[in-house]
Structure formats: structure tokens, C-alpha cells
Image (cartoon, coloured by chain):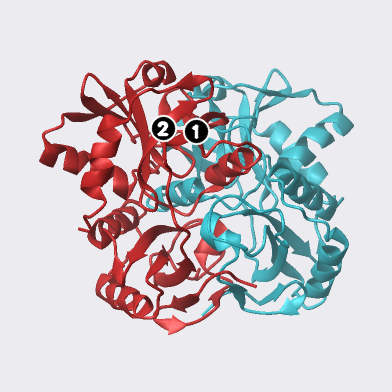
Chain colours: A cyan, B red
């Protein structure tokens, strides 16, 4: 029934999670989706750093990073050359009913392997602007927590269209990200991406792009951006761990002509894995 | 380990949920918390109506309401005279990885029984105002979905204080609800409660109060409300399915003197169960 190639909970092969886990009841946990390439988890350290940050922000007392590393390595030993590894850390089982954690929860680690489709986007991708706007809560912004109904709704809306990805605005009207990606624009040779301080996920690939801009001597910054500023840009690209850096050919009726910097970044980042 | 008195999945006693259920990965589902009183599920029809509304809003193809009714009845047959019955409907297992449902998911029903503590609040309760503000997304407002990290964070903040409940504002600054309750104010004999159209849960007891105001000839309305309007009110009360109608004695430094209408509504609603 499941499309997963394998699943382990706290290191033990398992296909079911205790029904009282707070992930089931409240989405109380965080996750990472990691590309496995010829037996290596790509950008593992960046993924684990964001996972840890998410636990800290949610006050999930996760101290088993060493165990999780071992479990990820054991799963990858069984993976095909290309796969997706997903790991979830939940707050664990509830000792009582109710929203408040009681502080005695024991976080639970899930590791699962999934098939990976080839990704290749010659000429870039076409985007649209979602009608749904993201709610703003700075306490939840940036981290990859398990409350992802906004992404589910955005992806459901997207799947009824021919576009590859939807761009999402926040409830104040600023550009934030895609339904499963981050977005960048290029203006006057400078790379700009929306601040992820009110909503959205700060993707691992987004962080790699910002870091590698520094390595390449390209000026980059995070800013509050409008859709109009995107349309006025010289080029645009989207990123995530799975697709890497992908030029945007068009957003709705607006076409982007160039993709020089996107292709340069993509070519530079593609061989990296740390 | 679990504090639950019993748990059933699709009618079968079970303590674990398939790890690929979308509730685990995205909080993709809805739930209800129902008071069981001497073998009867209180306000069952109102709970099931909201559950169905939530499934419709999230496009979860839930058609097994008859089965769920039977499973709730079977669980209650095993319940102590006073208990809490929680039911969750998830979108079901993912046929593939990714946010977008593919439309072939088979929703899953969870029913669990939990112990019930006596509730009695002589003289009313003391509230505080949460520092966290709720993100606004009209598509998710009102329904009781499984993305409840905001409630978890609010409850965690509350548990460090002596207050019974935290009042929550939305990111625009309007009063919305409590961390696990709805809020009402009384001014010039009229009952007013915040609109639940941008965020928050439209509680079953909130609906009962609005309905029974009509029965009692009390004028009631839903409105955009500020904290200042709450403080200017003659009285205030909070509601949820478990605690019923509970007068508010104080919010932070502000005291409420009267609780006449709250007590009248509480006395009127207490014997109802439909």
C-alpha cells in the first residue's frame, strides 16, 4: 500500500507509529527531505542543523542526534543509488490528552526511504501565483514543522493547473516562497530572496545558494519583496533540496528572458554535497 | 505508556497508525473532542457536522460517517460514565511522497477514549493574553484540523503561568479565541463573540451558545472585536465542549464584576445534550 521503500522508528523497522504520538494529534514535530545520491545523503549537515533548530524552536527535547545519524546511515546502506530519505522527529507520545506538552515526552525518530524521480528542467519551469495566502506566525516561520496543511492546499490547487509550482504570498501581500520551494530573483547582478521571518520554510538549498553566492563573489541578500519586484527582475529561479537550482521561464503571463546566473549557480552547486 | 483508555482505527482495536498516514506527515486531517456523560456522547450531531465540514473544506473524501457513528457507539459502550471521546479523520495513507493529495487516498477513522477530570470553576476563571499571535488563513479558519502547533505553543506558554487560559489575537491584532476555548463578551445585555473567519476554531459549544441565545431571547452576534472592547464589556465568558460555559473573573489586571448572563447560559445549556 505504501510507496515507501522502507521505514524505521527509533532504528527499528516498523510501518506504524503509536497512535498517541503528538505528530498524529497536533502535527507536533519537524521533518527533513534529503536527497540520497550514490549512497550519500546530500547536504546532511545542513538538514540536521535545520532539524535541530526546529526542535529547539518548538521546545522538543531532542537529544538523539547521534542515534539519528546512525539510523540514516543504516537506511542509506539499503537504498538504491538515487533515493529520497525523509526523517521526522516528533515530540513523542502524549502522557495525557491536551495541547500542552508536559515535558516528559520522549521524542521519536522516523526514517523512511522513497523512490526518486529524475529531475531535469531544460529551459526552466513555469510558475503561477497561488490564490491562497500564507498565515503569518514568526514563531513557526523558517522551520520545517509538520503543520503543512497550507502546503497541501497550495499543492492541491497547483495540481489542477499545468504550472510546475505556485508562488505564495503572505497575508500581508509579500512574496514568500513556493508551495515546495524557495524563490530568488536577480536584479543588477544581485541575488535577492524573500525573508522567511513571518511564514514559509527556509529551505536547505536556499541556504546553500546564499552561502555559495559568497563563494562566487555574487552579492546576495534577504529582503521583503513584492510580486511586482519579482516581475521587474532580470531573472528568477526556484530551489529545493530535490530539484536544486531551477530557472523560472514564466510566472503567469510574465516571461523571464535570462537565466545566466541561475545556470551558473546550478552548475556550481550541482557537484557539491556538503 | 499511553493515557488512552482505548483506541480503534477503522473500527479495529489498534494502538498504532500506519506511518505513511498523511496525518503524521502533514497534519492532514480533522478531529473532534466529545464529552461522554453517562454513556451519551454530548452534542454528537454538532461535532459530526463540524467534522464533515472540515473534511469538505480540506477536500478529504470522507464518506464513512455511518461507520464512524457505529465505532463511536461501540467505544462508548466500553467507556466509564464520564469520559472524553476523541475522533480523528485523516486523509489516509499517501500513495506517493509529496504535499499534493492524488485523490486516491482512503480516509482513516481513529476513535480513542480518555479519562475525564471533573470540571468546576466556582467564581469563574482567570485568563491572560498570549504573546503569540495567530496566523491568518481563511481556508483553515473555523475547522478543527490537525495543524495545531499554534495551540501547542500557546498552551506551553500558558502552562508556565497561573492563569486558566490564554486569549489569542490574530496577526492583525483582533481578539479571536483562547488556546482551547472560544470567548464571549456581554455588553448592554447582548452577547458578542469574535468572528472565526481568519483563524481560530469555531467551537461546538460556541455554536450551542449562539443557538441557545436565540432560544432564550438574548440578542447575539459575531463581530470583529478588539481586546479593548473585551475590557469595556460588562462580563465575559469562555466556552468549550468539555468545560461548558465558564465566567471570566479576570484577564490580566482587568477584573470583570458580573457573570449573570454567563451563569444563566451555563444553567440553561448544562442539561442539554443535543
Residue most extreme to the bottom: B12
Vertical comparison of A139 with B140: above or below: above
Please name the residue shown 27% across and 62% down the image. Answer: B44
**Dot label at residue B126:** 1
Viewer-side residue, A68 vs B15: B15
Give the residue at mark 2.
B248
Point out residue B109 in the picture as x, y percentages from the top left corner: 40, 71
Residue B264: quadrant of the picture: top left
Identity of the residue drawn at 41% across and 59% down? B31
Seen from the viewer's position, the closer of residues B12 and B22 is B12
- Looking at the image, is B139 positioned above or below residue B9? above
The numbered mark 1 sits on a residue in which chain?
Answer: B
Residue A261 to residue A123: above or below: above
- For the point 64% across and 52% down, which residue is it? A101
Please indicate, yes or no, whether residue A252 appears anywhere in the rendered image. Answer: no
Q: Chain of mark 2?
A: B
Along the horizontal axis of the image, is A30 left or right of A272? left
Q: Are marks 2 and 1 on the same chain?
A: yes
| Helix, strand or loop for disc 1 | strand
What crowding class fits label 1: few (fewer than 14 Cα within 10 Å), some (14-19), or many (20 or more)? many
Amino acid at each position: 500500500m505504501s510507496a515507501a521503500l522502507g521505514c524505521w522508528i527509533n532504528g527499528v523497522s516498523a510501518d506504524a507509529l503509536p497512535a498517541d504520538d503528538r505528530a498524529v494529534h497536533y502535527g507536533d514535530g519537524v521533518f527533513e527531505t534529503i536527497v540520497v545520491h550514490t549512497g550519500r545523503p546530500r547536504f546532511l549537515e545542513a538538514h540536521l542543523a535545520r532539524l535541530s533548530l526546529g526542535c529547539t524552536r518548538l521546545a522538543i527535547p531532542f537529544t538523539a542526534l547521534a542515534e539519528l545519524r546512525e539510523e540514516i546511515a543504516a537506511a542509506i546502506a539499503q537504498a538504491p543509488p538515487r533515493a529520497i530519505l525523509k526523517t521526522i522527529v516528533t515530540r513523542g507520545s502524549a502522557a495525557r490528552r491536551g495541547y500542552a506538552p508536559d515535558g516528559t515526552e520522549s521524542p521519536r525518530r522516523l526514517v523512511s526511504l522513497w523512490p526518486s524521480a529524475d529531475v531535469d528542467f531544460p529551459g526552466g519551469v513555469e510558475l503561477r501565483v497561488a490564490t491562497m495566502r500564507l498565515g503569518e506566525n514568526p514563531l513557526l516561520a523558517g522551520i520545517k514543522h509538520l503543520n503543512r496543511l497550507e502546503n497541501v492546499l497550495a499543492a492541491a490547487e497547483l495540481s489542477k493547473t499545468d504550472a510546475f509550482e505556485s508562488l505564495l504570498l503572505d497575508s500581508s501581500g509579500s512574496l514568500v516562497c513556493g508551495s515546495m520551494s524557495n524563490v530568488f530573483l536577480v536584479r543588477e547582478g544581485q541575488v535577492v530572496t524573500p525573508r522567511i521571518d513571518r511564514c514559509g520554510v527556509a529551505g536547505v538549498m536556499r541556504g546553500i545558494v546564499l552561502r555559495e553566492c559568497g563563494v562566487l563573489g555574487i552579492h546576495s541578500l534577504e529582503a521583503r519583496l513584492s510580486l511586482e519586484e519579482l516581475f521587474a527582475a532580470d531573472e528568477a529561479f526556484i530551489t529545493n533540496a530535490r530539484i536544486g537550482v531551477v530557472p523560472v521561464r514564466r510566472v503567469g503571463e510574465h516571461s523571464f528572458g535570462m537565466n545566466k546566473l541561475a545556470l551558473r549557480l546550478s552548475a556550481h552547486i550541482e557537484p557539491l554535497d556538503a
